[in-house]
Amino acid sequence: MASAEEASKRTHVEKKKKVSERYWQGSGEENKDEHRSGADVLGDQQPQQGSQTKHQISSSTKKKKRKPEGSHGMKAVTRVDPFPGSAPVPEEKRLKFRRKMKIDQLPHHLTKIRRVVASSQAASEITENESARYDQLLLLEDAGYLEGDEDEDTCTISQEDIADAVDITAGAKYFNLNLSQFGPYRLDYSKTGRQLLLGGKRGHVACLDWQTKQLMCEINVMETVNDVKWLHSEAMYAVAQKKWLYIYDSSGIELHCIRKFNDVLRMQFLPYHFLLATASATGFLQYLDVSVGKEVAAVGTKAGRLDVMCQNPQNAVIHLGHSNGTVTLWSPNQKEALVKMLCHQGGVRSLAVDKTGTYMVTSGMDKKLKVFDIRTFKPFQSYFLPAGASSLALSHRGLLSAATGDIVQVYRDVWNTPVKKPYMAHKVHGAVWGLHFCPFEDVLGVGHGDGFTSMLVPGAGEPNFDGLDSNPYRSAKQRQEWEVKALLEKIQPELITLDPGKLGQVDYATFEQRHQDKVKALGYDPLAKDKFKPRLRKKGRSSTGGVERRKNQVAHEDQREVIMATLKEKAETEKEREQKKNNNKETAAVKRSALDRFKKRNAQ
């Protein structure tokens, strides 16, 4: 029996799990050697030697239990975050995304309104903080400018030097197209800035991806081309030819010939309205809806030949320049001009409006370049150019390009401070016939008599684009989806006004007029407050005396508004009388003459 118990104990000890070693226990070679020696001893010993085996087992277990000091005393160190919570947002960035001011003073009895206002303010604060926090992450690119060395003028830096200094991809954006046979050329960039459309006066029309230099199509219409313009996407473009207006696709196939639009000289496309505005030599301003192919409006300006035209991107109003020095603003809703401005003493040669719709730049035959504030319709900057400016263009970042003959000059901050010298200058081969800044790129396209030139203008383009509106890297599927969405969100031409902010306001005058017409038609006022009718009570509590008593208790509430109005009128009239008396006393005291001292006091 004893041997069986010893065997059971021995087997129990041998099956005990080995404790895994930890990294703080150091090198475990000694322990491993000891365990091996102990195992060899147990294996060599016979079962009857119980005392020795017990002694060895107890020593081995004691060795296993021995651990370095501090092994069981280790505790998890809890470190306190020195910067708890999210990172603070500067107040300046929060002001950039603030939409409304806080409403603190509200009556205490309006509990429901106070609750709604508090929740809306909390939601606006959250969006304000998040937008300000991720502003730098979402808008990664910054706009830079050309800076010269000490005492170096930036306008003396040539395009070749800039192309050599920048990287290969940016340097490839400066190039020249020698097309002297069919020039001079007019040009237009697509809304995404990837495609370029060229139209030569002698009939040459070409569209290409100017960054990859891949030609999309090239045709010759065999007649004079006055202007070219991309439509809502790079799949279609319009060409104003000698007689009529033609629509082509990106492969050069003629889609439409619109004979209602004849003798077109200039064109502007309104992307959010899908309207193509044309100015003709006969003095007509016409609007074509390209989504349905119908003429929306035709306005006779009665101002002669229309060869100066631009649009306001902010409110889609068309600006026309005339030979008598005036600039007129037009909308398809009215047959008369919204505004007429006398800008120059001579004829107007070119127009340009910035993307915010705040400033308008004009150049005239009087060799002056003027900057107007469209909010007040008054000039606040005027410059004199020795040869005048034949073409003007404004970039997304506010740079102004002006062409005088074969020289293209670029100016910075023409509306903030008086400019004394140009920011950049470049000379091309032949007279300039068209200028256009490429969207989202520091590139200025110049169409001249010898072809086309792509200039590098640092700081001209907007570095961050809206991928939902105009994505330069969109695929064909994304373009199709965007086109469907844009058609669904198309703005009607009736909403084109000088001040688009009025569309969200309530027209109280028309509301009152409609209410009066409704009252006349119905014979009563449907919005009038009904008279108080006491509720019928039972058990003899609705006697005639009780009903009249309840009516008398509520009668003063119906007349409360009338009484308050009469009290206010009385108070105002009393204030006016007191003011008149005080004024009369002051005037009497002032008008006293020197002879008044001889008057008798009793008479006074």
Image: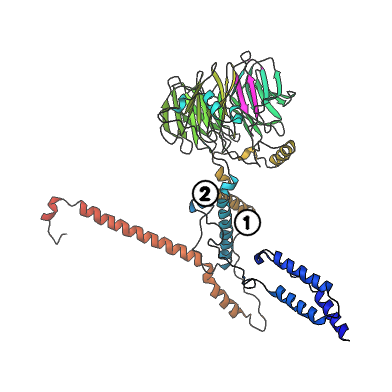
Which residue extends farthest top? 181
Q: Residue at x 62, y 68 (%)?
A: 76
Residue 294: name its quadrant: top right
Q: Amino acid at mark 1?
A: Gly
**Which numbered circle lies on residue 96?**
2
x, y percent for residue 93: 51, 50
- The magenta segment: 183-203
Q: Residue at x 83, y 80 (%)?
A: 49
Res 182 seen here: yes
**Residue 190 magenta:** yes
Q: Amino acid at mark 2?
A: Lys
x, y percent for residue 130: 58, 54
x, y percent for residue 544: 61, 79
Q: Is residue 205 left or right of residue 419?
A: right
Which one is closest to the eye, mark 2 or mark 1? Answer: 2
For mark 2, give the secondary structure.
Answer: helix
